Amino acid sequence: MAKSVSTVVKPDNVSKIFNQAMDAGGGILRLTPNWVPRVFLHPGKRIKLAPNDWYALGVHRGGIDERWFGSTTEAANDQREPDEGLSYVKFKGKRFLLRDAVAEGMGAVVGEKIWRKYKRWPVYSKFFDNAGPIPHHMHQMTKHANAVGQDGKPEAYYFPPQLNAAENHFDYTFMGLEPGTTKDDIRRCLENWNRGDNGILDLSRAYRLKRGTGWVVPAGVLHAPGSLCTYEPQWGSDVFGMYQSLVEGRQVPWDLLVKDVPKDKKKNIDYIISMLDWEKNVDPQFMISNYVEPIEDAGQSGDGYSDKWITYGKIDGHQAFSAKELTVMPGCKCTLRDGGASCWITVQGSGRVNNLDIQTPVMIHFGEEPDDELFITAAAAQNGLTVENTGSEPLVSLRYFGPETHKSVPNIGDHRKK
């Protein structure tokens, strides 16, 4: 297992190096890979991590199947490392937590409105990459997450073609519940938890996953993500509840159903059912309500470059997060003017953002620090970004934004108007 090439700066000493990094990058911070294992899943092996490092944290921790981007949110894993899920900024052989950078720079980093309201960077994104499906689960709505001191978590999916040459075992995702499903149907599934497959997928509907498309998944909606590698912008919370007792022959313990349930309600089936947003789960037009395809932003596209919305729309009237895919052709250059801070991951090619070189790695050993991920602070976004493709293939990047960053975003379903 490779060791990190940089040394960690403690929070009390971050101020000086943070200011140096901001000055050197013109408000753009370089981030290091943030690997997260999941003990109940099998790695899909497409997120560039070297094969010898899939179990770098130990087999007992599970395989590494996720890379988190621009995260100030801790991963809610058992036996976790103290900094698990937290992204680091790297600068001149040293690194410090993005969370500490946000605390130091406040509104200059995340934007004044976001800092005033949340006092943190309240979103993150990830690649999750599994060989097979994830158990049918949901992420709690705000009122249920607040009951255990957490935030509710809506999320969204995009399936980048660059990371999906292979489909793995199951490129379908079950989402929601079949219209007409009753709460008594769910009750029977939960009562049958220890009898093998509790049958909850019999009550759901599977959708074929397509590269270059995506979905929005509100909090409280059941979903069993399939095996395409997924880019997943989401709210900054790691709450969930697994409602499926057996997946691919592997037991899902009851503890993963009630991980984020108050202690006095861990056996209360009525309460567990109440955590589901029933109307959204049984929506007879579920695909129309939640499926998205890229939409070009004409104002930020031109000759040799295209900036497309890949995550958009509002969830319960709120622009919780959004994301775009920028493609710049060889030899071309463009200027981006975004409404606020974002986190950038390069998925193809090489180039430059302002004065920082970027390069898509072929393979990353655990602890190595490639130049593919950036945090673009609100201060840098306000000044505009010059992006140049210096390579011989398209330069493609994904970047996600925080809440209410844009004056307007497309509505879900707008891709059908093309």
Image (cartoon, rainbow, N blue to C red):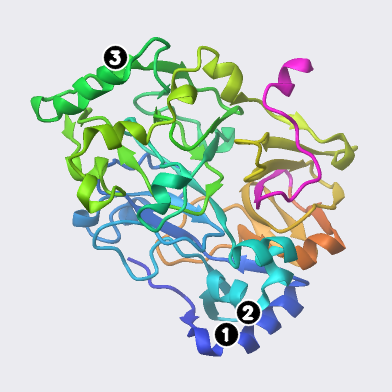
* Secondary element at image label 1: helix
Q: Which residue is mark 2?
A: 104
The residue at the point 66 percent across, 66 percent down is: 115
Mark 2–mark 1 Cα distance, whole angstroms, equals: 8 Å
Residue 207: % across, % down:
46, 17
Residue 394: tell me if it is visible: no
Badge nearest the viewer, 2 or 1: 2
Residue sticking out furthest to the left: 195
Mark 2 surroundings within 10 Å by alpha-carbon count, few (fewer than 14), some (14 through 19), many (20 or more)? some
Residue 400 is inside the magenta segment:
yes
Mark 1–mark 3 Cα distance, whole angstroms, equals: 52 Å
Q: Which residue is mark 3?
A: 202
Q: Which residue is mark 1?
A: 14
- The type of residue carrying mark 2 is Glu
Residue closest to the eye, 173 or 227: 173
The residue at the point 55 percent across, 18 percent down is: 287
Residue 120 is inside the magenta segment:
no
